[in-house]
Amino acid sequence: MVELEIQALALQREGLLIEIGRLVGSCGFTLLRQRLVQDPHGTLLTMAVRGSWFKKRALRSALEACDRLVNFELLPSADGELRPHFAATRKVTSGYVPPPSPPTATADASTGGADGANAVAVDVGAAPPAAADAPSPAAPEVFEDFIAAREPAPPPAPTPAEPVIEPFVDVPVLEADVPAVERALTTLEHDYPRIVPRLLALDRAVAAGARESSLQLAGQRVGAWLFAREYALDTGLELGAALTSIAAPALHAFAEVDLQGSQLHIRHSPLCAVDGRSGCSFFGGFLEGLLGPAIAPGGMSIFPVCCRSCGADECVLAVSE
């Protein structure tokens, strides 16, 4: 297995996460982290994925064939941290310094006129006496020239500030906080399906690195409990039948859900705030606990395609065997 980082630049943001998520899943890779940032150059998408090394060439070919992408880079993962995006706008520091305002000419003219007058007076006083028959020189006429003061040149317009791109901080992944999950689900039988406030409290109570694992564990326990209570007789189903008859109706207790093929589209998820933190790990765990005992023997994979906390219009979970 190998971890790769996909950096892509696109002109349109709408539906980008869904389309690239489907493309990555079709090549056999699993999404680890994702980031979507709006930039003056366009929409910057970063995905960390994990999959077989032998499928790397197929993934690159699929990205090259995607019409939505202006450009992309496929890089090895940097120890769990997302690199700065190759297409992000860089701040350029200019060394230009505006010239000082030119001095006004009024003071120079007045000073020069005074000095000239004094010079003329000294010259006249120091002149030798003229001969009797020579006409005395006429006194020089001093004209005061009017020089309009030039207005200083306006300073150059300030350079527009570049948008500040917040650095991505990778939080270390921790195991689920089992005691906190048990406290949150103490009154599950009486509160279900009105358990969203308890899940939000669990989200805030645990450490940042244990958020997703704790929500996933809570989802697994709620899903297993609901299967035992409502669907214990529905076993040996195919995945498509299980999604139609069990998964979609059960998720309606939390949000508006639309089943499209093998993908569950969750609209207005109460656990996934816009520009906030994702709660899709609860829904993934919920499907694992709910569908695991129902489907025919075989593995089940749940792939989070996109989440509205990362800028998507809705949360999408792709379920496959």
Image (cartoon, rainbow, N blue to C red):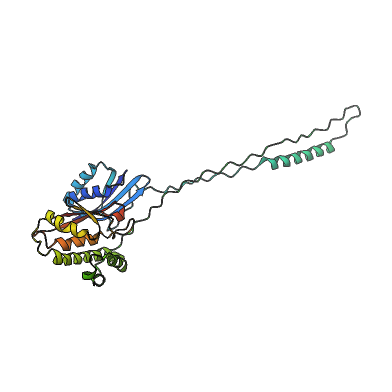
- Looking at the rendered image, the quarter that the N terminus falls into is bottom left
Q: How many marks?
A: 0
The quarter of the picture where residue 124 lies is: top right
Residue 22 picture location, percent across and down: 21, 49
Pick the front one: 17 or 45? 17
Residue 26 picture location, percent across and down: 18, 49
Q: Looking at the image, which residue is at 78% across and 39% down?
A: 117
Residue 82 visible from this viewpoint: no
Say left or right for 69 vs 292: right
The quarter of the picture where residue 218 lies is: bottom left
Say left or right for 126 vs 271: right
Residue 311 visible from this viewpoint: yes
Pick the front one: 250 or 117? 250
- Looking at the rendered image, the quarter that the C terminus falls into is bottom left
Pick the front one: 36 or 130? 36
Say left or right for 54 vs 97: left
Find the residue positioned furthest to the right: 132
Residue 28 picture location, percent across and down: 17, 51
Q: Looking at the image, which residue is at 91% across and 27% down?
A: 133
